[in-house]
Amino acid sequence: MRKSMVVFVALAVLAAGGAAWALDTNTLTVTASVAGTCKFSAPKTSTLNFGALDPSVGGNVSVTTTTLFWCTKGVATLPFTSDQGLNFSGGKNQMLDSASGDVIPYTIDSLNPDGAANAGPGTPRTLTIAGTVLATDYTSKSAGNYADTVTLTITP
């Protein structure tokens, strides 16, 4: 009987203590944010090539090129901008022939993104870049290779 009583008391203590060991809960809130951004896609270079400008033919030369970019879904694509290039002078962008020192002015006429929706880096979009060289700006220049470097920028 004494043995039964000890077992009974032990079970009673465990039962009473079990209430102290009851489960409790905590609510865990999980959060994240997705950065709204726009970036140029690799290789992040493009060339606006006016080709061989022939003074005997003359005429304005307008060309286009494209580059790829992407923006986070839901981000408005803001205007693209270009700096003035390395050879800017007299209010004009200019290509320089380093051998002769001659320059040929040119304009970047437009930076136009396609009309597609922004869907992230897996779905790049196309930016069309248009530029013009006027005939009066190259018909009296030295033969040579002319170049400039312009930085394009997109900021979401």
Image (spheres, rainbow, N blue to C red):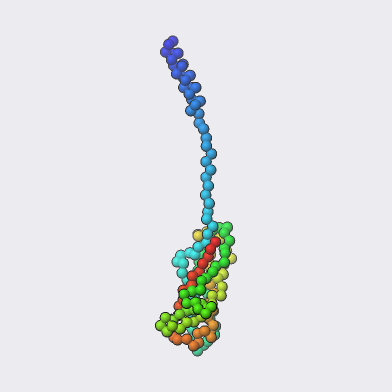
Residue under the point 53% across and 39% down: 27
Residue 98 figure quarter: bottom left
What number of labels is visible?
0
7 up-or-down from 140: above or below: above
Q: Is residue 66 visible?
A: no
Residue 10 image point, x, y percent: 45, 18
Q: Residue at x 46, y 16 (%)?
A: 8
Residue at the far front in the pictured view:
90
Residue drawn 58% across the image and 57% down it: 74
State whether residue 60 appears in this view.
Answer: yes
Q: Give the image location of residue 38, x and y in percent.
A: 52, 61
Farthest residue to the top: give it. Answer: 1
Residue appearing at x 49%, y 82% in the figure: 104
* Relative vertical location of residue 56 with respect to residue 85 in this rendering, above or below: below
Query: Residue 86, percent across and down?
Result: 46, 75
Give the quarter of the image for residue 143: bottom left
Task: Please tell me whether residue 42 is drawn above or below residue 2 in the rendered image.
Answer: below
Q: Residue furthest bottom?
A: 56
Instruction: State the image coordinates of residue 43 (x, y, percent, origin top left).
Output: 45, 66
Q: Quadrant of the N terminus?
A: top left
